[in-house]
Amino acid sequence: MGGTRRRGSDRRAEIQDVAVDLFTERGFDATSMREIAEQLGITKAALYYHFASKEAILLGFLQEHLGALDELLDWADGQPPSPERSCEILSRWLALSTRRGLRTMRFAAVNQTALRAAMPAGQDGVFQRIERATLLILGPCAPLQDRLRIRLALLSLHTTVLAARGTEADDADILATAIQAAALLVGDLFPAPELPKPPAERRKGHLTHFPE
């Protein structure tokens, strides 16, 4: 039973990864469930077994990313405040991009309308989590400029993804540049975050560059 659940979970993750790559390359509205199934080499019926619609694929993908951020922030909330904790929060936040976060950032950069439509009304999004992370990193009485610096550091990956459009930058380039930007932004507030390792493998067909 456990093996079956894991295989089902792996299949759902593969569907989400392929679909989000297609949404990024072609646009959410221009991508059909048939095209997703063809890219995966499965039937539409098999695709619909896992997801009722492409909106459901996108929502599941986004919720998993937000859930990973929540796990990080919940962990941080249980640790005593310190410069080391602040560094660890930022490092782990950026390290999430070595898994599925970078896909999310690429998608978000070119599908803002679909992203807003996918989020259920009243549900907190990334910016609410950035606000919580900033509070955990700096505490409640930090000066405004310091708060803005931390928010920019937390957004460094998103900003770097946007800056990389139209260039030959790959995942490793984007991650390295984002971490350098974050380190410059935190300055003397706490130790600079460490560079997370880039993905060891890229799935065949994975977009390492932005579409033109």
Image (cartoon, rainbow, N blue to C red):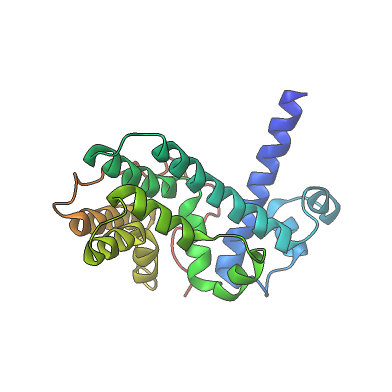
Residue sitting nearer the eye, 121 or 91: 121
Residue at 24 percent across and 59 percent down: it is 181
Vertically, is 23 above or below 193? Answer: below
The answer to whether 33 appears left or right of 83 in the picture is: right
Q: Quadrant of residue 2?
A: top right
Residue 204 appears in the picture as rendered: no
149 vs 138, nearest the viewer: 138
Identify whether 38 is placed above or below 25. Answer: above
Relative image position of residue 12 (x, y in whole percent): 69, 45
Using residue 48 as the reference point, say whether residue 204 is left or right of it. Answer: left
What is the quadrant of the N terminus in the image? Answer: top right
Q: Extreme right residue here?
A: 45
Picture coordinates of residue 165, whole percent (x, y): 39, 71
Quadrant in the picture for residue 89: top left
Confirm whether residue 85 shows in the render: yes
Q: Is residue 82 positioned above or below 109 on the image?
A: above
Q: Which residue reaches farthest front? A: 141
The answer to which quarter of the image holds residue 209 is bottom left
Q: In the image, what residue occupies the spot 35% across and 55% down? A: 134
The spot of residue 58 in percent (x, y) is 65, 59
Q: How many marks?
A: 0
Q: Is residue 15 left or right of residue 163?
A: right
| Residue at x 45%, y 58% (from the top left corner) | 208
Residue that appears at 71% across and 33% down: 7
Residue 82 spot, x, y in % from top left: 25, 38
